[in-house]
Amino acid sequence: MLEQILTHLNSIDPVWIYFILFFFSFIENVFPPSPSDVVVIIGSTLIASTSLGFAPVLFITSIGSALGFILMYYLGKLFGEKILRSGRLKFVDEQSLYKVDVWFRKHGYKLILANRFLPGTRSVVSFFSGMHELHLLKVFIFSAISAFMWNAVIIYMGMKLGQNVEKIDSYLSAYSNIIIALTLIVIIFFVIRYFLKRGKK
C-alpha cells in the first residue's frame, strides 16, 4: 500500500509536493489533529527517488511551521484575553491560567524553542505566546529553529524509509493483517458473549 502511494506521488510535479509539505507544516499549528509529521515523513521518502532535495524540504517545512506558529500567535494576541479570561470557557479556571502566566513569564522563549518536541501542545504554546505578547521577531526565530531541528529528524527518517520501502511496506501489511485478525476475534468474542447471555435469560 505504501509503495503504491509513493508510486502515485512520484508522478506528481515536485512543485506540488513542496506546496503540500508547506501547507501541512503551516496548518498543524492551526489545526492540531492534522497528520503533518506523517505527511512530511512520507514526502521525504521521495528525496531518494525524485528531484526533491533535503535542504529545500527542510527549509519549506520549517518556514511553513513557523508561519503557522505566527498566525496562532496573532490569534492569541487579539483574542486570548477575551476568550480565556471572560469566563465563557467553563473548563478554564483562573488558577490554571495563573499557573500558565507564571510559566510563560519564566520560560516563554524556552517553551517556543521546545514546542516542536511537545506534541499536542504546539498550538497552545503559540496561542499563549501571543496572549503574553512576547517579542514577535524572537518568537518567529525560536519557532523556526524549533521546527528546523524537529523537521531535520523526521525528514532524515523519511529518507531512510524511502530506501527501504518494500521492507516497510511488508511490515505495514503484516501489521494491518494482525490488527484485522484481532478486531475480528474481539467482535466474535462479544457476539458469542451476547448470545450466551441471551440464552441464559
Image (cartoon, rainbow, N blue to C red):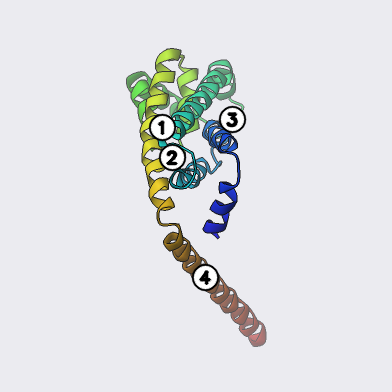
Q: Position of residue 139 (x, y in %)?
A: 42, 19
Mark 4 vs mark 2, CA separation in Å? 29 Å
Q: Amino acid at mark 3?
A: Leu
| Spot occupied by residue 62 in the image (x, y as percentages of width and height) | 45, 29
Question: Which one is in front in this view, the residue at disc 1 or the one at disc 2?
Answer: 1
Q: According to the image, label 4 marks what residue?
A: 177
Q: Nearer the viewer, residue 159 or 24?
A: 159
- The residue that appears at 43% across and 60% down in the rendered structure is 168
Q: Nearer the viewer, mark 4 or mark 2?
A: 4
The dot on residue 55 is 1
Q: Label 4 sits on what residue type?
A: Asn
Q: Which one is closest to the eye, mark 4 or mark 1?
A: 1
Which residue reaches farthest bottom? 199
Name which of mark 4 and mark 2 comes first in the sequence.
2
Q: Earlier in the sequence, mark 3 or mark 4?
A: 3
Question: In the image, residue 152 lies at what x, y percent?
Answer: 37, 36
- Helix, strand, or loop for circle 1? helix
Residue 187 percent coordinates (x, y): 59, 74
As helix, strand or loop, the secondary structure at mark 4 comes to helix
Which callout, 3 or 2, points to the residue nearer the camera?
2
Q: CA gap, disc 3 to disc 2? A: 23 Å
Q: Is residue 160 above or below residue 54?
A: below
Q: Nearer the viewer, residue 165 or 49?
A: 49
Number of the front mark, 3 or 1: 1
> Split into 4 quadrants, where in the image is the C terminus?
bottom right
| Badge 4 or badge 1: first in the primary sequence | 1
Q: Quadrant of the N terminus?
A: bottom right
